[in-house]
Image: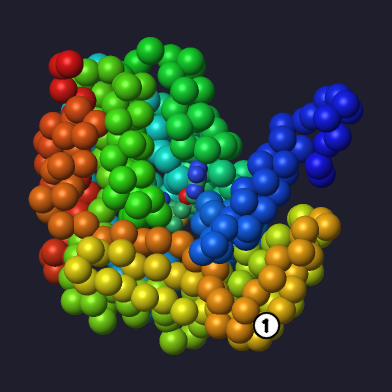
């Protein structure tokens, strides 16, 4: 996996991705507060576990956003300006498209000229999504973009100069810290043209018991989802994590909206990652994922940081989740 400096290796895209995976895992495990990038949760097993999480009674996010996509479809379509000129819908971290399919269906039924470009780091889930779209909406023009968010926006811009509508659903934005989210929208704002739209699903601050339970389900699926990343590192990077020696822990800070998932080492132990020995104290944690919750005011501030104007804020009936629709303002 590691190249010597004097060896030139012609790498395939898959090898480059493997190297990136290795270096990011190594970087995370050698920091003072150990961490692992949550984007690597999603191999085929991780995709399946996430689908099970979405079905958990505690995981309200999917149900809330599904309600918006089924009950407020016309408002959503109007807010993205669906009856104007042809456009491209780029969905970042599209997953299995559970909710998006309702918007696509609405647009297709209204004879809208659009193309759907789902982006996901998991090629596996994109294949599932393509099957769903072909089965339910055979006339929709779909082109999958396997890769990371910002790289794939650049790729999509090279495909056409049509107006862009970016979807970023399910609270994926919560996996960035608020500072990272500001940088993310600044970069997206730089890549888009005035008049382009951005739709983000934000999970709103609420009763801390409700938030915490969503990331700590009684059946232990979230635990399995987190531990699966250690299995993946063993399988793909040849590490020797004893997965039974880690347990799952989740915290929510209602003051700043940060919900964090950790794995906790239950004993003092060593893990070997391709020759690098990583030491764990008993009780030491690996930060696995942040799921940031937002206030309505902080969402408006985030929109402004990227140069966007808020066009609509659609909420579920309980007011737990919002899809915030923005338009890039003239600079
Ligand atoms: C929590 S799931 C949500 C899926 C979907 N947005 C929804 O609302 O159901 C996150 C999805 O984003 C993808 N993902 C995570 N980080 C990514 C990244 N940096 N670039 C591209 N896709 C990413 C994952 O593979 C996964 O399918």
**Residue 46 percent location from the top left of the image:** 59, 62
Tag 1 residue: 268
Whether 251 is drawn above or below 40: the answer is below
Residue 228 in sight: yes
**Residue 48 percent location from the top left of the image:** 57, 64
Whether 108 is drawn above or below 272: the answer is above
Find residue 293 and report its image quarter. bottom left
> For the view shown, which residue lies furthest in the front direction?
32
Q: Quadrant of the C terminus?
A: top left
Relative to 215, 19 lies left or right: right
Residue 83 in sight: no
Front-most of 331 and 171?
331
Front-most of 253 and 313?
253
Instruction: Give the residue displayed 66% in from the left and 42% down from the top.
Output: 20
Instruction: Give the residue displayed 46% in from the left and 62% down from the top.
Output: 289
Relative to 143, 163 lies left or right: left
**Residue 239 percent location from the top left of the image:** 78, 63
> For the view shown, which residue lies furthest in the right direction?
7
Relative to 55, 296 lies left or right: left
> For the view shown, which residue lies furthest in the top direction?
161
Whether 252 is drawn above or below 289: the answer is below
**Residue 294 percent location from the top left of the image:** 21, 57
Whether 147 is drawn above or below 203: the answer is above
Front-most of 139 and 329?
329
Estimate how packed mark 1 is, as few (under 14), some (14 to 19) or many (20 or more) residues with alpha carbons within 10 Å.
Answer: few
Q: Quadrant of the N terminus?
A: top right
Instruction: Give the residue displayed 72% in from the left and 35% down from the top.
Output: 16
Front-most of 190 and 49?
190
Element at badge 1? Answer: loop
């Amino acid at each position: 996996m590691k190249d010597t400096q004097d060896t030139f290796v012609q790498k395939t895209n898959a090898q480059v991705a493997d190297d990136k995976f290795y270096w990011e895992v190594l970087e995370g495990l050698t920091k003072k507060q150990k961490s692992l990038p949550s984007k690597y949760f999603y191999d085929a097993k991780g995709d399946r576990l996430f689908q099970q999480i979405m079905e958990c009674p505690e995981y309200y996010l999917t149900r809330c956003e599904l309600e918006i996509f089924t009950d407020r479809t016309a408002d959503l379509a109007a807010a993205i300006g669906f009856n104007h000129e042809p456009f491209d819908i780029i969905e970042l971290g599209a997953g299995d498209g559970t909710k998006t399919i309702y918007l696509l269906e609405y647009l297709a039924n209204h004879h809208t000229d659009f193309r759907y470009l789902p982006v996901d780091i998991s090629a596996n889930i994109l294949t599932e999504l393509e099957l769903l779209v072909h089965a339910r909406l055979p006339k929709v023009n779909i082109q999958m973009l396997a890769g990371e968010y910002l790289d794939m926006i650049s790729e999509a811009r090279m495909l056409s100069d049509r107006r862009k509508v970016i979807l970023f659903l399910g609270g994926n934005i919560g996996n960035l810290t608020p500072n990272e989210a500001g940088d993310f929208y600044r970069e997206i704002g730089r890549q888009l043209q005035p008049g382009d739209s951005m739709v983000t699903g934000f999970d709103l601050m609420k009763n801390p018991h409700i938030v915490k339970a969503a990331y700590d389900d009684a059946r232990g699926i979230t635990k399995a989802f987190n531990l699966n990343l250690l299995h993946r590192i063993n399988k793909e990077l040849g590490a020797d994590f004893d997965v039974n020696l880690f347990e799952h822990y989740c915290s929510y800070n209602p003051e700043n909206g940060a919900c964090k998932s950790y794995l906790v080492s239950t004993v003092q132990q060593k893990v070997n990652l391709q020759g690098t020995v990583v030491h764990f104290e008993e009780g030491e944690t690996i930060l696995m994922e942040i799921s940031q919750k937002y206030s309505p005011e902080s969402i408006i501030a985030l929109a402004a940081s990227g140069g966007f104007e808020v066009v609509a804020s659609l909420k579920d009936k309980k007011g737990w989740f919002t899809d915030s629709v923005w338009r890039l303002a003239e600079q």
